[in-house]
Image (spheres, coloured by chain):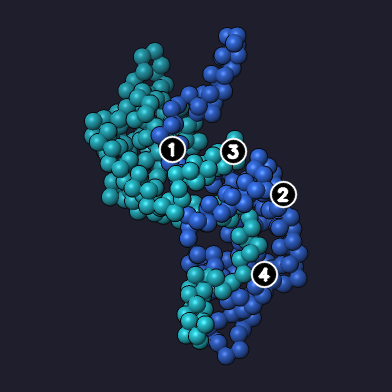
Chain colours: A cyan, B blue
Amino acid sequence: MTMSKRAQRADRAEATGDDVDQTVLRSYVGYNMKRAYLGIRADFIASLAHLELNPSQFSALVIIVANPGVSQSALARALSVERSAIVALINTFEKRGLVSRDPVPGDRRSYALRATEAGKRHFAQAVEATDAHEKRYFARLSEEERATLIALLNRIED
Amino acid sequence: MTMSKRAQRADRAEATGDDVDQTVLRSYVGYNMKRAYLGIRADFIASLAHLELNPSQFSALVIIVANPGVSQSALARALSVERSAIVALINTFEKRGLVSRDPVPGDRRSYALRATEAGKRHFAQAVEATDAHEKRYFARLSEEERATLIALLNRIED
């Protein structure tokens, strides 16, 4: 190896933090999860920005489209978030004309959520952007490896 | 199945959000990553709370102990965080007597970070708590599966 290649490698190592011993930190599943998740999240946020949706709003819209008439409580449980967060999120969707809140006959405390026509069109664009993000971001993993990754993640969570 | 078992199952499904169709959402690698990561993070925060360390502080302490004399800039690069965040974090560590900031001869802009004796003892306790958290939280995965998970996560990030 020539000195200039060595120097280049050292520069690159310094720029990426590879000049620092990270062996212990990288031995933890949790730290690797954090690094991977934060990278994915940043790319996903950028991928949805033109639709003015953040990841949580995207998740909520997917659930509402797949479950017409779902209640705010059921949506909160499905996404494992506080009901108050869902109420705020649905307020935003309602103002933007993406989701309607319909009264539930016989239950004055509940609302049935449905995507409007505009909401369904927005959803279709968001799914397209998300599919493109996933395809690009996980390009180094085969279909089978992605399935393995999802299965391992779900086993942890169970 | 008796009616009471059905009812119990329905109650459980409602409590966990399983009464809602999440098929589309769960098909995304990113969403599964988010769910898994947030669960791990909550458990890790609780596991370190008695040591008054958050996950970022733990990561920084691990790097400093493994790399005596590391600079703030190199630490920031290794953890992929802003240098200003590291400066604030090291201020806290210095006040708590866990890390010393020594001048670097010939470089007035840089400091060499080292764990103090108290910092090393705190680090040993934190590693013990983290090992216990990882062992408990990832109990459903074999050693081999954990290694596969880490390898897949690192392939994404590369």
- Earlier in the chain: of badge 1 and badge 2, it is 1
Report which residue position mark 3 lands on.
Answer: A155
Of the residues shown, which amino acid type is indicated by label 2?
Ala
Please state the horizontal and vertical placement of residue A17, each as a whole percent of the image. Answer: 53, 70
Subunit under mark 1: B
Asked if residue A140 lies left or right of residue B142, the reply is left
Mark 2 touching mark 3, by CB under 8 A? Answer: no
Subunit under mark 3: A
Asked if residue A2 lies left or right of residue B128, the reply is left
Report which residue position mark 2 lands on.
Answer: B132
Distance from the alpha carbon under mark 1 to that under mark 2: 31 Å
Give the class, few, some or many, for how many residues have Cα within 10 Å of label 4's Cα (few <14, many ≥20). some
Q: Secondary structure at mark 4?
A: helix
Of tags 1 and 4, which is closer to the observer?
1
Q: Secondary structure at mark 3?
A: helix
Distance from the alpha carbon under mark 1 to that under mark 3: 15 Å
Distance from the alpha carbon under mark 1 to that under mark 4: 39 Å
- Earlier in the chain: of badge 2 and badge 4, it is 4
Report which residue position mark 4 lands on.
Answer: B66
- Earlier in the chain: of badge 1 and badge 4, it is 1
